[in-house]
Amino acid sequence: MATSEIEPESSGTLVMSRATESDNHFANLRSVRWRVNLGVLPSSASSVDELRRATADSRRRYALLRRRLLMDPHLLKDDRDSLNLFIDNPLSQNPDSAWGQFFRNAELEKTVDQDLSRLYPEHWCYFQAPGCQGMLRRILLLWCLKHPEYGYGQGMHELLAPLLYVLHVDIMRLSQVRKDYDDYFTDMFDSLSFKERDISYTFDFNKFIDSMDDDELSSQGYSKKIKSLDELDPEVQSIVMLSDSYGAEGELGSVLSEKFMEHDAYCMFDALMSGTNGCVSMASFFGYSPAKGSHTRLSPVLGACSAFYRLLAVVDASLYSHLVELGVEPQYFGLRWLRVLFGREFLLQDLLLLWDEIFLADNSARTFTDDDEDSRNHMFSVFDCPRGTLISGMAVSMILYLRSSLLSTENATCCLQRLLNFPEDIDLNKIICKAKWLQALVLSSNGVFEQRSSVPKSVPSNSSLIVTPDCYWEKKWRLLQKSEEEEEKQMSPPTQKKKKWLKVTNLFRAVTDLSRYKTRSVLESLSQKLSSNPEGEANGCPVTVSMENSPTQETEEGSMDFHTADEDSITSDEESSSFYSDPTSLVRDSNYPENDSNSSTVLTLCPDENSNSIDDLLSAEDSSVSSEPTSPASRDCSTSSDSVSEEKCTGQQTCVDSPLPISPHSRNDYPETQCNEDDSTDKSVSIITKEHKLVTGIVQWFLKCKRNFSGEETSKRNATESHPQALSSHKTGDLDSNLMKTRKTLGQSMLEHIQVIELIFQQEPGLVQGGLIKNIAKTELIEKGQDTATTALRELRKISNLLSGM
Amino acid sequence: MVLVLALGDLHVPHRAADLPPKFKSMLVPGKIQHIICTGNLCIKEIHDYLKTICPDLHIVRGEFDDDARYPENKILTIGQFKLGLCHGHQVIPWGDLDSLAMLQRQLDVDILVTGHTHQFTAYKHEGGVVINPGSATGAYSSINQDVNPSFVLMDIDGLRVVVYVYELVDGEVKVDKIDFKKISTSNSAP
């Protein structure tokens, strides 16, 4: 096998965050790690001997299989005396004949060869070498013969090739170690190490005499050679122990062995395909019949495709609806992605990193607690295990990576072209992190991803995309409520405020993560502000976030950077993970027109530590915020979290909010007036469809926050009055956990708020604008603001209709 | 693992209509790599039919063949074996082993395949094999009225050839086999 282009394993692996102790031993031995993860070797091996024994057993099984299945009709003839020639002649049509089997094997081999000849042409030195091809062919043939129900499917060779490759890399590493640490590999026979390999028969007198001369040197060298393995670093030590010829099971048990590469590759391939009694078995992805016990009538791969499409719908409804509109079914690209585990999308080295992560994920089906038994995921069996969810998460993360280019396509062909030609220069770490985030999302949701049956039929069809997530968000909200209430009881008000603030920021952070369009300046300013003002400050930490709705929709690194920046500055509280899912629920405005662009909003929100009202916070001075409490617009945001705190702090409304002053560096203005509806949190509607929607939602949300804590202007007292009622009813609704009722109340409150805003707009347009937008030219603002506001209001009306209709 | 089908003396349409259906059902395309035919097909249609079973068809001229372009003798090399092909009406006395051995030495082949007698025979002779596949249709010959349809399939594998004989006896296909191992000659290419 050509070794010229095979580099030894570089240690630049990525997120090995969940490496267990055993993994650490084999950090650089990918094949051993994978064998442990796939189940070929025991994961809880207490000693090297156990590993060796398991290796030997698996190899024996393969050898037996090979002897049995790879038959040669000639050999058969010799063995058997009484041969029924009528059956066993070459032209026999009898299906039992040995020749018939031979011809079938030949057919299979032809199909396999077709695929193998096209395997990894970019690494043809290794993969197209005859030895390697022969091994691959044999392994595939034997597997297919052993599993006639699956046969050979195109793509199986792509799953097998990297497995063989990692074995080869490890063998290279072993030979490297052997060279470097030759001393340690001397066969310790009778615990004596022999300087000369051949001791007795080829005793060379001359050499002996020479060595006598360099007696001192030789004795030193001799003593040097008797070293103990403990001197080596653990990795090399493990390599030596694993490949020692005299260890347990001898050569058959030597875990890294060139002689048994085929055996090991077969075992890994078999484990991967069968899934070792887990949920995700790659072989099922090649089958066409529906899986037993699945509630859908789809084959497993189609089920998995629809699962990750569903996940996409949940996290990014706009992209999902765009793809659905174009008619891009998930299986067009998903089939290739899933069947070869993204082997065709990434370069080999990247793929190895990705498979590290996938194999690390546990493949055993999750056990559900009794409470959640009813919410068990019946629709998507692929979500039943961490590995399956990670794979789906990876698929969604890849789609999201191409988000901007996909959204700009006009037809399905373009779309598919982009999906099937994944770019090469990518930051795989990011994609994998995102995938893990999605995985956590799904796993923490306890499988509330489907249950279409519980969706009320009265919901109009155009909102079908948004209806089903309700169930999920509903449940999330309820869980959140419970946890919050518990928390509230335990904490004192100031800390509650702090918690609220943390939640707010975390939510915000997560939302912006999803929105993916933060600019550098924003990030910097935000992190700056956050770090400069620890949560405990009274006039504290304004959170400045500027959101751009740029039609170009460049995918910035923003979201991830923002994420990380925040993590440094904000301590995540225990609910932060749940909040990752929450923000999407909070930010609503599904029907918002998508044409609003080139507008940006800067929200500032200052946390309040001491006072009970956020209006103080909002009115607090800030460098970029105008704290003039003249904003007329009623910004009503209600959030689940805040509704609880409302109880505690209603009635403290004094000052007017300066709701959303816009910072000087915002380019276009987008008066926040347009939001103002209580986006009925998780109960209600759908998910962000576009950036604006996100913006409006966030704006709404913050307004609500502010609203809850502070109050309103005198001109909006009516709204205020209605608001607490709505909120209280909202609250009661929540407490009753009566879905419909709360929805109705929310809708009503939304309507009220809308009315208020309209009123205000009609009455005091100038004042509103002027009050709102402090540091910016008013002229351009006013015009644009009004347009946007009115459109927003229209949309809000629609939403409220929806909600009240439910 | 090269499968070579040897047959001949079909005499279609003059003396027989077609191959027996049981034979036809066995001869499916895709399994056989070469066909060597001893001659006397006689018409083009049978030639085409044989071509569908295997595209590599070698045929020599029998005295009743329509196509005059077939050669009298043919020599092929398949694997490690040299095969000689001749109809056999040229060799007198018909079917005599010594005469055929003379032809074999003349052609310098390991395996000589001839026909014309409509009788299956297979001799191991002087380090070589002389095979007569008989008549695949069971057509009568000038010396024999009662002919059983038969043909031969050779499985050439390295230095070893296994000869399977298929004969239709009383409506049933009977199979027999003969092993033959060639003594490896130092036949290095110059």
Image (tube, coloured by chain):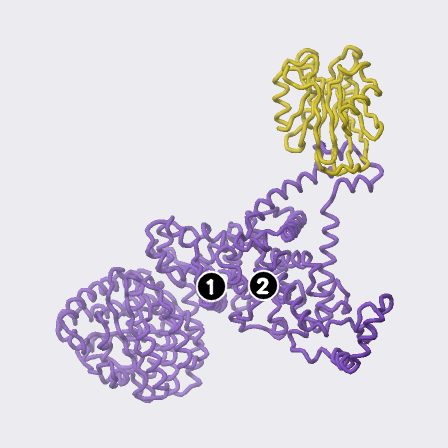
Chain colours: A purple, B yellow
The residue sitting at 73% across, 54% down in the picture is: A63
Residue A745 visible within the image: no
Query: How crowded is the residue under tag 2: few (<14 C-alpha within 10 Å), some, or many (20+)?
Result: many
Q: Amino acid at mark 2?
A: Asn
Residue A430: give x, y in percent of width and height: 44, 67
Above/below status of B65 relative to A722:
above
Quadrant position of residue A466: bottom left
**Image position of A736 (left or right of A703):** right
In the rendered image, which residue does mark 1 sit on?
A448
Disc count in the image?
Answer: 2
Q: Amino acid at mark 1?
A: Val
Tell me whether marks 2 and 1 sit on the same chain: yes
Residue B43: give x, y in percent of width and height: 63, 15
Residue A206: give x, y in percent of width and height: 83, 71
Q: Residue furthest right?
A: A200
Q: Distance from label 2 to label 1 (Cα)?
A: 20 Å
In the rendered image, which residue does mark 2 sit on?
A363
Of circles 2 and 1, the one toward us is: 2
Closest to the observer: A246 or A620?
A246
Query: How crowded is the residue under tag 1: few (<14 C-alpha within 10 Å), some, or many (20+)?
Result: many
Residue A777 visible within the image: yes
Residue A665: give x, y in percent of width and height: 23, 75
Image quarter in which the N terminus of chain A is found? bottom right
**Image position of A167 (left or right of A398):** right
Image quarter in which the C terminus of chain A is found? bottom left
Dot 2 falls on which chain? A
Above/below status of B85 relative to A422:
above
Quadrant position of residue A20: bottom right
Above/below status of A796 relative to A615:
above
Instruction: Answer with mark 2 or mark 1, whichever residue precedes in sequence.
Output: 2
